[in-house]
Structure formats: C-alpha cells, structure tokens
Image (spheres, helix red, strand yellow):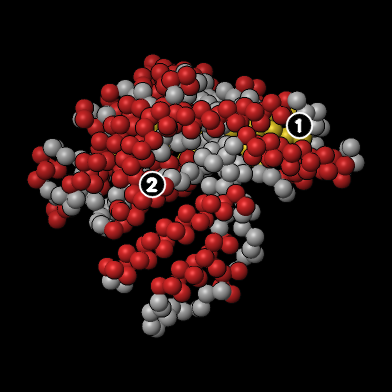
Amino acid sequence: MDVEQFRKAGYDAIDRICDYYYSLREKPVVAQVQPGYLRQLIPESAPQKGHDWASIIDDYQKAIIPGLTHWQHPSFFAYFPTPSTFEGTLAELLSSSTSNPGFNWFSSPACTELEAIVMDWAAKMFGLHDSFLNINETGGGVIQTTASDSGLTAIVAARSRYQRENPGVSLESLVIYVTTQTHSFGKKAGMILGLDVRMLDVDETVMKDNTGLTGERLRDAVREDHVRGRHPFVLVATVGTTSSGAIDRVEDIGAAIKDNFPSIWLHVDAAWAGVTLACPEYREAAQLQGINEYADSLCINFHKQLIDALDITPEFLRTKEGDAGTVIDYKNWHLGLGRRFRSLKLWFVLRSFGIEGFQANIRKCISLNNSFVEHIRACSIFELVTPPSFALSVFRLIPKSLNALNRTFYEIFGLTTVGKVFCIRLVVGASRTEQSDIDNAWNIIKGVGNSTLAKLGYA
C-alpha cells in the first residue's frame, strides 16, 4: 500500500467506524457466535500473495464484527467499562503511524516527556499529593499496560525495598497480603514471584457496609505471621474492588502500618473507582486523604511508582541523559523494555474533554446507577447484597438463602460472590448509556427474575 492508497483506505476505515457507532445501539450486546466460528471463515494458512485492501476490510466487516462483544454498547453492564473515544482512536492511529519502542528519552524524546507531563496532569486532576508528580523528582507516574502489571511492578518494588531494609530475611518467609475481595492479580503475583499470598477475610464487613480491610484486622494478621516467622512485606489495598466495589480503609490501614510495621509497602489498587477522585465530592469516599498520606504506590489506570525498582540497564541502553538523572527512562518503571506511545491518547482525550467533561461523565454514570438502585429497592423480589459503590450495584433474588436460585439467574446475567453468597452485579460505564437503557435493563432483569421464581416454584 502506497501513501495515496493509504489515504483512500483511511477515509474508508473512518467511514466504517462511524457507521459502526451509528448502528451500535441496534446490535446485540453479546456476540451471536459459537466457539470455533472464525476458523470456518478464515483459511488455515496465510496467503502466498497479498490480497487487495477492499477484500481485507470487507472480511473484517463480515467475519470479525459479528464475533465482537460490544463493550461500548449503551446496554453493556458487565465486568467493568472500557470506554472508547474518537479522540483516543485518532491518537491510536497517529501513534501507530510513527511506531517506536520509546524505552528511554533518547529513543523518542516526545514519548517520554509527554508521558511525564500527562501523568502530572492526571495526578493534579485526582488531587494527589505533590510527591506523586514527576516534576518534583520524588515520585511520579507511568502508564502501565494493565492494573495487573501495575500491581506486579509495585510488589517487585516492595520486595526490593524490604530485602534492602531486612537483609537477613529469606525469600521463603516473605508474604504478600491481599483480601478476599482483592483482584486476582494478587494471587498471580505470588505465583509469578514464587511467594506466599495470604488472603485476609473481609466478606462479612463488605456485606454489612462495603467496608473492606481495617487497621485492626491488619495488625492482628501481621502479629500472627510474625509469631510464625513469616514476614508480610506488601499489602494490596483496594478502592473499589472488582467483585463488589468494596473500599479498604486506607487511612486506618496506613496509620497501622506507619505506627507498627513501617517496612510494609502499601499499594492501593484503585484501577476502577480511582477515577472518581477527579470529582471533589467523591474524594472522601475514595480515600484520597489516606492515599496521599500513606500510599507507597497507587494505580488508577495510571500507576504511581515511587522508586526505580527495575533499573537493570545494560550499557548499550544507557544514555547520558538517563545517567545524569535529567530525564526519566521509563523502561525501568515497568516489566517490559519497549513501550507504546499511549500518553498521546490521554493527551488528546484530556484536552478535548477537559476536566469538566471528564467529571461530567463520572457523575452521569453514578447517577444512572443510583436510578437502578431505586428500582431494586422498590422491588419485592430483589435486594441489594452490598451498599452501592459509585457506579456499581450488587444484588440478588429473594429468597436470599437459595444460592441455586441466583445460580439459575446467572445463566442470564453476570455472577459474583460475596462470602458464600451468589449475587448479580451491574456496572454503568459506557458513555452512550442513557436513562432509557437503565430502565430497559431493569425491565429485562425483573422479567427474568419473575420467570426464574416461577420456574422454581416460588411465584
């Protein structure tokens, strides 16, 4: 494809993207295909000779689009949202057109410097302490691939610091602390690093008032482990857990660590709910004061890492700028070497939306979830399992003692568990979701709930 062919194909691709979004509301949310469908449509081997672009893009339309679950659909309420903006799409196009690894400043100065700038923009927008700013050279922000990578990087950094401060402690005695509501990356980190993971049970308090881990529970656990010769070195606290939106009490936990166990690293996983920090009225609930005072690292889709824990740089990658400390070499701030130019997307989106636009979308999603909660509270066949958490609701069918009932309901909707209770979760996040979509979802949920009760003889 030459430049002019690319120009023509680009116009066509943008048209197809626009047509996709115009028709999105009419599409089914979930892909209507069976496992293995794509192998029936695509040859077993790559072609010996290249195909013309028109046939390639047509095959995308015919074979790929039908196999997509549409996470940007106005009626997508599962998992957690993955919003897509046209600004971000254009940034993705531009960044891929100038592909480069971006592992240090010299390899592409703009990639490093823009990331440092937009990370500072994000920290200020979220109300974070100045120590989280790159410009202050005491901490700073880096864009990781996922929240799981962020957590793993923080745990590696925590281990490095703990071993430095406690050189006589064996690796076999180190313990990662998570809770029963922590994202699965905590367990995976233990598997990857060959370390023990202890899950602190918080399910009872989560069901009561959505409170996760407290300082008292942490103190008891650490003292138990110390008696056994075990050494907890990092705690993953969460603001807005994946399963239920539960919130660990960061200020209480942080004070317990500072006063009793200062060698323990506090990583705060706020990958989902952390964006609410952009709105001043949600900062108390989202634990901003505790984060600013006690967190060693923080993930809000943007990981705040306070030390250069992964600096193992061979000579051929060293630069005079990096050695002089005048720039950030981001290769030392995450697990990989090469990096994508993702800061361009954040720069485009924040400039186009502005902080006010960002806040408006957050407030809209929370408001829509509140309207769904009103439906639940007014209905005799459902009840909330946990208090609503920002834009997330966790609920179940009544009678509550029958997990089999909610397992049956799960065949239609998404399941989670809090303790040993099966329940259903709904989260609002798609930018195109409106009140009518919430009302439609409720009508479907209520209808399926009534039919489920009738099917099992409870109607």
Q: Nearer the viewer, mark 2 or mark 1?
A: 2
Residue located 32% across and 26% down the image: 124
In the image, is 88 to the left or to the right of 117? right
Of 438 and 240, nearer the camera is 438
Regarding mark 2 in the picture, which secondary structure is present there? helix
Instruction: Residue 207: give x, y in percent of width and height.
Output: 65, 26
Q: Residue furthest bottom?
A: 48
In primary-sequence order, the first of circles 2 and 1 is 2
Residue 433 is situated, as x and y percent measured from the top left of the image, at 57, 39
| Residue at the (52%, 18%) spot, across then down | 216
Which kind of residue does numbered mark 2 sit on? Answer: Gly
Q: Residue at x 57, y 52 (%)?
A: 24
- Looking at the rendered image, the quarter that the C terminus falls into is top right
Q: Which residue is mark 1?
A: 382
Residue at x 51% of width, y 40% of height: 431
Q: What amino acid is at disc 1?
A: Phe
Q: Residues within 10 Å of mark 2 (few under 14, many from 20)?
A: some
Point out which mark residue 117 bears.
Answer: none
Say which residue label 2 marks. Answer: 88
In the picture, the quarter occupied by the N terminus is bottom left
